[in-house]
Amino acid sequence: MNKELKIGIVFVIVFITLIVGINYLKGINVLNKNRTFFAVYNDIAGLQVGSPIMVNGYQVGMVGNIDLLSSQELLVTLKIDHDLAISNNSNSRIINRDLMGTKAISLILGNSTYLMNEGDTFITSVEGTLQDEVNAQILPLKNKAEELISSMDSVMIIITAVLDKDARKNLSNSFKSLEETFDLMSKSMSKVDMIIDHNNEKVSKIISNLESISLNISSHNDQIKNIINNISSISDTLLRKDILSIIDNFNQISSNINNGEGSLGLLIKDDTVYKNLENSTAQLSELIEDMKKHPSRYVNFSILGGKKPYKKEK
């Protein structure tokens, strides 16, 4: 074997070793058969090439490549080197491996009877970061602290207002007025007690009379109910019969008068009747006046039986 051939063989071995080593450092074992799957994310949250792929905490592969698509989504190539049956409803979830935020992919296997083929795309999701979890826990505490601070501000404002000189003076005056009011109420109650003491017998009689009245009312409750029912029935009867008939009669009379029927209707509707009545009244008035002035025209008598003939005045 010549020298050039030896150098070529050594170069090929070194090149193959270099490729295997680089892939091994990336987490890709070129000696094992890998199956390639894909997952599409809107945000990979710091996932890197070579990040482990785990099932229930056991590593079954590594991230082979990450590409940015034209839709601004990220296409992640998953290299799985285990002969693992993966259902087509399995989820490729980006998780946090530690408190430092190191990312990995956890395969959440589904329960479907249909299996994924090499080259298929996983359903994807992203676990919340540690910061998101802390914010979710701290945000309610932050809101309560703000409410507490606001309440403390209100209390301090009230205390400051109370400790003000004018406020203290007004508060003292209010207490004084309240004390005077209580004194007045006490005196009034004392007077009421005195009045009751002096009129104890009268109050007792009044109470006994009220009790007797209430007992009488209670004992004659049935009679009172009967009286009320009788009054109610009488009023209903009057309402149904008498009053309605009177109203009907009145309406009939007014209708006859408006139609010109009867003397009153003719008097209202016919001017001739009114004028004749007016003329007759005037003539009767003149006749009575003339009889007062000249009674001899209408009545002639004499004590001796002689009659004076009526002479017409000039």
Image: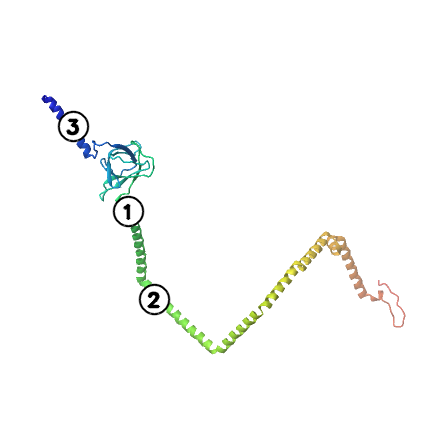
> Which residue is located at x 26 percent, y 45 percent?
131
The residue under label 2 is 172
Q: Earlier in the sequence, mark 1 or mark 2?
A: 1
The residue under label 1 is 135
Give the SS element for disc 2: helix
Q: Position of residue 265 (x, y in %)?
A: 73, 54
The image's mark for residue 101 is: none
Q: Is residue 138 above or below residue 119?
A: below
Q: What's the amino acid at mark 1?
A: Asn
Of tags 1 and 2, which is closer to the observer? 1
User: Would residue 208 be visible to someone looking at this image?
Assistant: yes
Q: Is residue 312 left or right of residue 96?
A: right
The residue under label 3 is 15
Q: Position of residue 191 (x, y in %)?
A: 44, 75
Q: Dot 2 surroundings within 10 Å: few (below 14), some, or many (20 or more)?
A: few
Q: Earlier in the sequence, mark 3 or mark 1?
A: 3
Q: Is residue 210 left or right of residue 167?
A: right
Q: Earlier in the sequence, mark 2 or mark 3?
A: 3
> Which residue is located at x 65 percent, y 60 percent?
237
Q: Position of residue 14 (x, y in %)?
A: 14, 28
Give the SS element for disc 3: helix
Q: What's the amino acid at mark 3?
A: Phe
Q: Which residue is nearer to you in this view: 67 or 282?
A: 67
